[in-house]
Amino acid sequence: KNLGAMSSTRNLTMSKIALVDDDRNILTSVAMTLEAEGFEVDTYNDGQSALDAFNKKMPDMAVLDIKMPRMDGMDLLQRLRQKTSMPVIFLTSKDDEIDEVLGLR
């Protein structure tokens, strides 16, 4: 099989990723990595800024931190689930089991 063709197809179907984190270093390093793989990445410093932007144009996928100012990742996910079932990944240093369970709801 041609793996290059498979990779190109993946990027066509999942091209815009929203990265939401209040840590500028994480935003920069993860965005650079995703862009190097061919994804278009929009970055946001907090959940409220991301939600405001998502109300105008929804990304294909979101990567969220849990603890952020203005609106945390859990609140953002709850609001997103009222409108969309887009894939969401939590990128966080929190390791409490309750946080994992809440994130899966």
Image (spheres, rainbow, N blue to C red):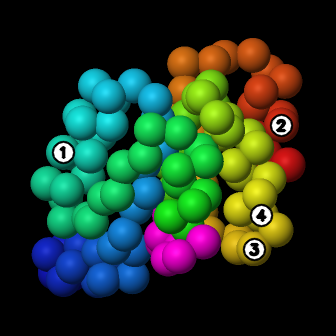
Give me the C-alpha separation between circle 1 and circle 4: 27 Å
**Nearer mark to the viewer, of 3 and 2:** 3
Q: In the rendered structure, which disc, 1 or 4, sits on the residue that comes first in sequence?
A: 1
Residue that numbered label 3 is attached to: 83
Residue that numbered label 4 is attached to: 81
Residue 19, percent across and down? Answer: 42, 48
Give me the C-alpha separation between circle 2 and circle 1: 29 Å
Tally of numbered discs: 4
Residue that numbered label 1 is attached to: 32
- Looking at the picture, which amino acid does disc 2 mark? Leu
Q: Kindly indicate whether the residue at mark 3 contacts the one at mark 4 (C-beta within 8 angstroms).
A: yes
Position of 39 compared to 47: left or right? Answer: left
**Nearer mark to the viewer, of 4 and 2:** 4
In the rendered view, would you say 70 is above or below 88? above
Quarter that holds the N terminus: bottom left
Instruction: Name the residue located 71 percent from the left edge and 51 percent from the top edge.
Output: 77
Residue that numbered label 2 is attached to: 102
Give me the C-alpha separation between circle 4 and circle 2: 13 Å
Q: In the rendered structure, which disc, 2 or 1, sits on the residue that comes first in sequence?
A: 1
Crowding around mark 3 (Cα neighbors within 10 Å: few <14, some 14 to 19, many 20+) is few
- Looking at the picture, which amino acid does disc 4 mark? Arg
- Secondary structure at badge 4 equals helix
Give me the C-alpha separation between circle 3 and circle 1: 28 Å
Confirm whether residue 89 shows in the render.
no
Residue 74, percent across and down? Answer: 74, 40
Q: Kindly indicate whether the residue at mark 2 contacts the one at mark 3 (C-beta within 8 angstroms).
A: no
Crowding around mark 4 (Cα neighbors within 10 Å: few <14, some 14 to 19, many 20+) is few
Instruction: Name the residue located 66 percent from the left edge and 17 percent from the top edge.
Output: 95
Instruction: Name the residue located 14 percent from the left edge and 75 percent from the top edge.
Output: 4
- Which one is nearer the viewer's eye here, 103 or 44? 44
Q: What stretch is highlighted in magenta?
A: 55-61
